[in-house]
Image (spheres, helix red, strand yellow):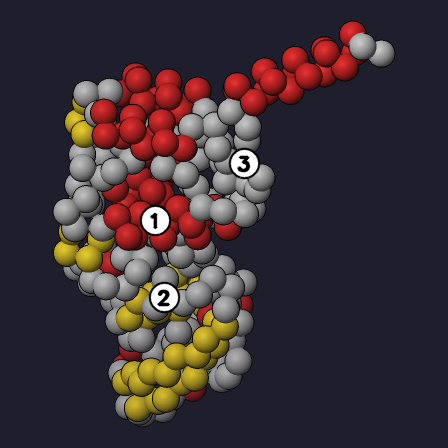
Amino acid sequence: FGFHADIGPTTVTARLFDDPFQSFQFFFQFRVDPNSLTPDSVMIEFEPNNTGAPPVPVATNNFGSLLEPSWQLNDFLSDAMVLGVYEFTSVSELTDFNEDGFSDIIDIDLMLAEGPIASGVPVVQGVNDMYDMTGDDVIDLDDRDAWLAEAAMVNGFTSPYKLGDATLNGVVDGLDFIEWNEAKFMSSLSWADGEYNGDGVVDGLDFIEWNATKFTSSMVPSVPEPGAWVLVMLALLFCRRHR
């Protein structure tokens, strides 16, 4: 998210990232033009998301908590330099790129769309830096892996999403194969198509990723393979017959 440190309604002077749901402080200075003051103006405005919602006063914003102080523009009688100290608590997970409250396929597709990321995509501050999960100024497969790990935790799984889990339901299974099969041999930058390795093509390499993790889960323990289920059923039948 960002904050406005001037009167201009569209000027974002800083974009801040932090650990989800952790408090932090930021310090800033701004100069006020007394000729622009109005009785109902508010000095600091906070933009909660990128959906086009209008900024709201920090003092009444439920996305953050204002510590001190709350300045109204009409408090100033002359041009003045003011130092402000505020504290906010993040309400958007770092994995929720579109800030819709979910860390899902839409978000990882936004990252992959910057690519192909397999060879690395340079970070441009203020443009695609939110996808640089590792902070190394390159969007690559390390960032994909970081997203899979963090998003899985956000969604209640005990281990990272697996390569091959096209549906991101926590299980690599036949549904994921169907997604890959429908898009195979096509150019794509979408995880939902089974494009796992970030090279821009749904092909045999992506199938290999699915095959390597098939019938496993992002929960512990892993989901048994079909062969194991067959053995379990046969064992139960055998026990029943010998009672």
Name the residue beneath numbered marker 2.
17
Instruction: Kindly check if marks 2 and 1 are in contact, taking CB atoms under 8 A apart as contact.
Output: no
Residue 222: mark in rendering: 3
- Residue 134's x, y, as percent? 30, 60
Residue 158 lies, with reference to residue 16, above or below; the image says above
Question: 210 and 170: which one is in front?
Answer: 210
Q: Secondary structure at mark 2?
A: loop
Q: Amino acid at mark 2?
A: Phe
In this view, the residue farthest toward the front is: 242
Instruction: Kindly check if marks 2 and 3 are in contact, taking CB atoms under 8 A apart as contact.
Output: no
Question: 93 and 236: which one is in front?
Answer: 236
Q: Nearer the viewer, mark 2 or mark 3?
A: 3
Q: Could you tell which of marks 2 and 1 lies nearer the N-terminus?
A: 2
Name the residue beneath numbered marker 1.
145
Gap between marks 2 and 1 measured at Cα: 19 Å
Gap between marks 3 and 1 measured at Cα: 19 Å
